[in-house]
Amino acid sequence: MNPIEELAPKVVWRNFYALTQIPRPSGHTEKVAQFLIDFAKQHDAEAWIDEAGNVIMKKGATPGYEDRETTVLQAHMDMVPQKTKDCKHNFETDPLDVYIDGEWVTARNTTLGSDDGMGVAAAMAIIEDDTVEHGPLEVLITRDEETGMDGAFGLKAGELTGKYLLNMDSETEGEITIGCAGGVDILCEMEYQEINVESEGMLCYDVTIKGLLGGHSGIEIHKGRANANKLMARLLFAVVNTKTAWLCSWHGGNMRNAIPRECEAKVLVPQAMKEEFLALVDKCRAIFEEEYKDVEVKGFQLTATEVDEIPSKAIPEDIQENLINAVMAAHDGVLRYTPSMPELVETSCNLAIIDIAAGKAEVITLARSSSDSMKQYLANQYIACFSMAGMKVNLEGGYSGWQPNPQSPLVEMMSDIYEKMYGKRPEVGACHAGLECGIIGVNYPEMDMASYGPTLVSPHTPNEACLIPTVERFYDFTLEILKNIPKKQ
């Protein structure tokens, strides 16, 4: 038995560990969906997979609670597949290597999947444990939340009957979330004709940035962490504009909702400009280290490594300059804080993915805002910026935010319960991350919803970890909520 399965509460940690052994990156959730269906059948719960790929389970009330309103326990089955540059882990086939590190559970060189494996594990524990007191239950485990909330978008009206929904996908124990930002994916694309290059008198360098903290582009966007794509743009702007290098390819980031930690570019350098090129790399490294010395506390690496193979193709001069200029000009990070709540980010964007090679260029950004007009303003900025670079810009997967309901009876009840259990009121507010509640609420407008969870740090990065003591508090809180769900009117 793995030591994680011995942590309290065992029923939660055992199910969480089981989830870590099933590959479930976004876009590849078939195995975990079938695992959940089999689990439900083993514990005599009704279960099915809906047309959108979501897993839905139903469990009847325990004796004495038959007259309570139906509650929906909601989480998502997929996880963000992030790993360190040298890690060989295959998220589609390999189990995670999870371990205990002091008061934390984490994974070796990869994301942990506690976002939102902890929510799924808690729902599984309640399905499994017949001693838990509750009214009628529905469990909704959605598909591909991390890459576009596809499962929530595809959930049809009438699949659920619950009056209350407990979204177990927040990352700070002791907080209850009642609103979140909306978002939209901005896709910039173009094709170009590569040019032939003369290898005589040329050197080739792989320029690499790695070791950045990265992070969740919603809940950590305000922390001022470096974006590898933006740092690379600054370096390329310096070396290309001074004619000391010619860009052949550029790759950075791999998830729209993860601040990019790593980036690499292949450049050609005339032998006569070698020393000037390396001096510019050194200068940029020193600047970046000084700028981020108080933020990127683990340090990062900027290297330029000479390679033997000289590419035969490169990006045309006007194209490379337009692309670099556009990435330089494009906004990244916080754009505006909420005027009525200055501590809360209102509008931001994450310049997440750059792929430029072999005649194709793609830039993907996730824009977030609790204001639809500001979200559109930010999207229009990108349309204007990248259109001038000759790229076609499309907006995809747009959704509005979840509007807070300060008068929510569910939240008031939860706050009272938390204070009784732990001697203080929970923090109640909105967050800048995307949650599925607003999307689900389109087809279930009368459903009262709240989001909460155990404490996680650095989700969407290989540093993701879950604080062990908060899991028991989160689960005990959930059980007490279920015991106090009101009677049907």
Image (cartoon, helix red, strand yellow):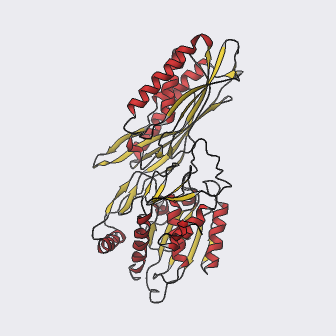
Query: Which quadrant is home to the N terminus?
Result: bottom right
What residue is at 36 percent from the left and 59 percent from the top?
404
Q: Name which residue lies at 36% across and 46% down.
A: 345
Q: Nearer the viewer, residue 172 or 45?
A: 172
What residue is at 61 percent from the left and 45 percent from the top? 87
User: Residue placed farthest to the bottom in the image?
Assistant: 64
Front position in the image: 180 or 208: 208
Q: At which x and y percent is residue 386?
A: 52, 30
Relative height, residue 230 to residue 419 (above, below): above
Residue 477, given in percent of the width and then of the height, sits at: 39, 72
Q: Position of residue 443 (x, y in %)?
A: 50, 64
Q: Quadrant of the C terminus?
A: bottom left
Front residue of 267/408: it is 267
Residue under the point 59% across and 29% down: 265
Disc tally is 0
Residue 244 or residue 165, whichever sits in front: 244
Residue 243 seen anywhere in this rendered image of the structure: no
